[in-house]
Amino acid sequence: MEVLPTLFDERAHNLEIYAQKQIFNRMAILNELPMNQNVAGEFTNMVASSNPDKLTGDPITTSEGVNFSEIKFGEPSELKGSTKPKGFMFRMSKRVADRGRLESTLQIFINKSIGRLINYYDDVFMKGLIAGSGAPAPDDLTPISKDITGFDILANEIKIKDAMEFQNEDDTGFSPNKMYLNRQDALYVKLALTESGLTDESEFEYVPTTKLPVGTQVARDTVNPTATIEKYADPDYSILAKFEAESKTGRLYDENGNPVPPSFINIKISEPDEPQRSNYYIFTEAGLNVMEPSGIMTIGGN
């Protein structure tokens, strides 16, 4: 069993471990989907088309830095995806370090950077789920509003589960258990279930997000992986990626025997480009690769 040290000699390695814990603790989807170390930075999504006669459109930009161009390829179609580095830089002056504020200032920098990276990837991954969703949504759902009842919500869940589990009368092997929705819609759902005393009857985990408009929901199966996170952690800037590459199993563990999440964060500390200044970089490179469109459903948003 490959065990990581509790403390590294190099500051960059310790910053990486701290940043890794922050982003994996705050971004659930990183723990739910398999990760693939993608050196090439390119991948292919298999997306089932709901309209086989629809002509190929113009290239689609799903978010800044992640471009997809659709290719006509029978059924299903292909979406070519790519990963792009995203991150932040901070300049640390010798004066700050001399005043004993180096560690606290770096922690603030890492925390702010992680928050913005989470905001960015929330958008990238949500758009990826929507673009890759292939399960048809029921057309007789009760719209979410302040007047919705807990019974309406449970009825919606039953219809959504049936629509995903059986497509064209075939058992897909997928069953939704997580629903992403706008924060306002999530509040209405929570209030309705609570007031009706039906919270324990719900089979969905409702996840509020700012990345969806009111009325749009995305349901997915988190038990059976429907997508992978394609990422690249550079062994030159990620001690975890370096250890993974050298490990016989590719898996790492902490001192308590718990699995360490896959490498995701890159940290670089450069030589001063100005007198008495050092540059600190934190960056990531990732994209969402939908493998099973039948396990993802987009509701509304038309």
Image: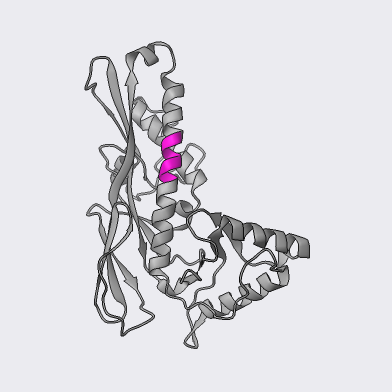
34 or 161, nearer to the observer: 161
**Vertical relation: 89 (above or below) 257:** above
Q: Is residue 139 above or below residue 223?
A: below
Give whichever of 9, 65 is nearer the camera.
Answer: 65
Above/below status of 257 relative to 194: above
- Magenta stretch contains residue 161: no
Residue 49: x and y in percent read 35, 78
Q: Quadrant of the N terminus?
A: top left
**Residue at 74% over, 60% down:** 194
Which residue shows up at 43% across the image and 23% down it? 105
What is the x, y in percent for residue 76?
Answer: 32, 78
Q: Position of residue 296 (x, y in %)?
A: 46, 70
Q: Is residue 237 visible?
A: yes
Give x and y (percent) for residue 167: 48, 83
Residue 285 left/right relative to 130: left
Side of 115 relative to 84 (left or right): right
Q: Left of 101 or right of it: where is 66?
A: left
Q: Quadrant of residue 9?
A: top left
- Which residues are the magenta region? 112-118
Q: Residue at x 68, y 59 (%)?
A: 190
Residue 258 visible in rendering: no
